[in-house]
Image (tube, rainbow, N blue to C red):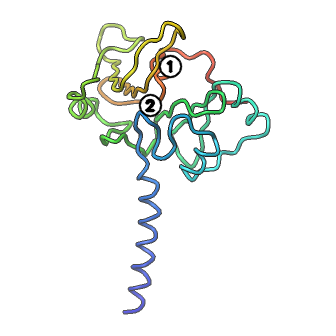
Amino acid sequence: MMHSKIVLAGLVIAVSAASAQTDMTLTTAGLGAATIGSTLQQVEKATNVSFQLNPNQRKNWLVEECYISSNSLPGVGFVFERGRLLAVTLGKGARITTRSGIAVGDAERKAIDLLKNDPTYTRGENHYGDGSMTNMEIVVGKAKFNPQRNAYDGMLMKISSVKGSIDSIEAGRASYVALFERENSGECM
């Protein structure tokens, strides 16, 4: 009898640790407690992930826009600009979902059904579409173009799909998420 209680306690601890990892959800505000605008140290604390950056990388992410990832969160990328979290990206292998339960690999139809009643919902062919409607994007969130900055202000989430399957999700500052091409994003070398 005592042996089964010990095993049960072990299971509870294992489940708690596993659910702590899966409790992180992606919203336009960030990934769980790792909110847009956070520093690298704040993101590390919020995600319980230590990013292994050399001194040169740590210097570069303070002055440039760069992408940081960790093997501890497969398929998840963090985009920083001037030392602050700008956006979070989910790609192949990500085990994180949006607040609505949408994940990379899901059918686009799931995202349409879950988000179509959002007042900010838009859906259309992405920038690289060829008219066949096989490369689609769903965008939700609030953003407005600011001509003084020549950029978008606000927060967005963009769900991209190819042939009906979601292949990436980006969320964060509209100035990053709304862009079709990014020339400066790099690996913070």
Q: Residue at x 41, y 40 (%)?
A: 26
Q: Is residue 33 above or below residue 60?
A: below
Instruction: Name the residue type under label 2.
Output: Ala
Task: Using the rendered view, name the quadrant where residue 121 is placed.
Answer: top left
Instruction: Name the residue type under label 1.
Output: Ser
Task: Using the rendered view, name the quadrant where residue 77 is placed.
Answer: top right
Residue designated by label 2:
171
Quick one: 9 or 74, which is closer to the camera? 9
Q: Position of residue 185 (x, y in %)?
A: 61, 23
Q: Residue furthest right?
A: 55
Locate the C terminus by quadrant: top right
Gap between marks 1 and 2, in whole Å? Answer: 11 Å
Q: Is residue 54 above or below residue 135?
A: below
Left or right, 91 with reference to 113: right
Q: Residue furthest bottom?
A: 1
Q: Are marks 1 and 2 in contact (CB under 8 Å)?
A: no
Q: Residues within 10 Å of mark 2 (few under 14, many from 20)?
A: many
Q: Position of residue 20 (x, y in %)?
A: 45, 58
Left or right, 122 with reference to 26: left
Residue designated by label 1:
175
Q: Is residue 181 above or below residue 142?
A: above
Disc nearest the viewer among 1 and 2: 1
Q: Residue at x 20, y 28 (%)?
A: 117
